[in-house]
Amino acid sequence: MSKRRRAVNAALLIGGLVVVWQVVSWLVPWLTGANALASPAETLRFTYGLLASPSFYPHAGETARAFAIALIFAVSLGVSIGTALGASRFAGEVGEPILVGIYSIPKITLYPIVLLAFGIGMPAKVAFGAMHGIVPIAIFTMGALRNLNPVFLKTARVQRMSRWQIASRVLFPASVPEVFTGFRIGFSLTLIGTLLGEMFASQRGLGYLLMQAIGLHNIRMITAVTFILVCVAVTASAVLWAVDRRLHRRIPAEG
């Protein structure tokens, strides 16, 4: 599909979503008798005012810092765990069901434990965000190593490469596409976990703004903050998805 065609499809999708949003904003007051959703135009006006307000940026910066730290922990621990389990068949067979079991647990049920362990504030947000991203990154890393073409390792041994050379010149380049896919998924989940952490135990951040707006029934604030988060998440996901596709496209050429 050409770039122009993809751009047209994206524009049509965005336009369709805006139309649906506008129609729903008309129907909700008529059906429920309450103004529970701001229209697109009203949301854009309020978002512009919010972005122009100096009081907004300390909250945005708090969320960005918590998310960045949580993502670093999620990637570091996820890749380390996945590498350890993927390098050993026995460890992978034992560890994979455990990871899948942990991943199936609703993370919100663990939040009281996180609060007891880390207290209220930045550490709890970071821990809760990292919890959401570690497992998918670990699973994709483990799968990348376990599904590695055995011809690569045999060729490396024939050429008498050292362990470091095998890891840096064979394992790492061959596993990067799948590991990056795990990173792309972990990125989104870590952001969700960070925002949830801010919503339940924080005095600053975009999640805190959302909970405060919900408590005050400030529909415009809720819609504007949600709109900002959606724009950031969609943009980041689109960039990561494009990189992911490029990495996977290189595999046949390198083979």
Image (cartoon, rainbow, N blue to C red):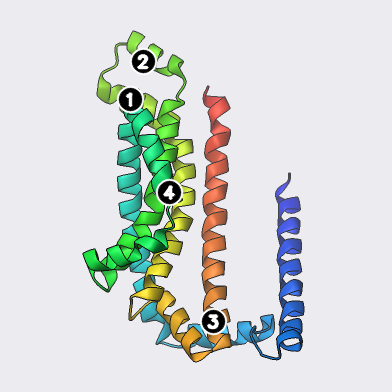
Residue 40 in picture, x, y percent from top left: 68, 80
User: For this view, does 145 lie left or right of residue 6?
Assistant: left
Q: Which residue is mark 1?
A: 90
Residue 167 in picture, x, y percent from top left: 32, 27
- Residue type at numbered disc 4: Tyr
Is disc 4 placed on a helix, strand or loop? Answer: helix
Bin the neighbour count of mark 1 within 10 Å (Cα to Cα): few under 14, some 14-19, many 20 and up.
few
Is disc 2 placed on a helix, strand or loop? Answer: helix
- Residue type at numbered disc 1: Phe
Q: Which residue is mark 3?
A: 222
Q: Which residue is mark 2?
A: 156
2 or 3: mark nearer the eye: 3
Is disc 3 placed on a helix, strand or loop? Answer: helix
**Location of residue 195 by image quarter:** bottom left
Residue 61 visible, this orientation: no
User: For this view, does 21 lie left or right of residue 195?
Assistant: right
Q: Nearer the viewer, residue 99 or 66?
A: 99
Where 69 falls versus 143 (above or below)?
A: below
How much space separates mark 1 and mark 4, taking CA atoms? Answer: 20 Å
Residue 213 visible, this orientation: yes
Q: Which residue is mark 4?
A: 103
How much space separates mark 4 and mark 2, taking CA atoms? Answer: 35 Å
Q: Considering only order in the chain, which callout, 3 or 2, is on the residue closer to the N terminus?
A: 2
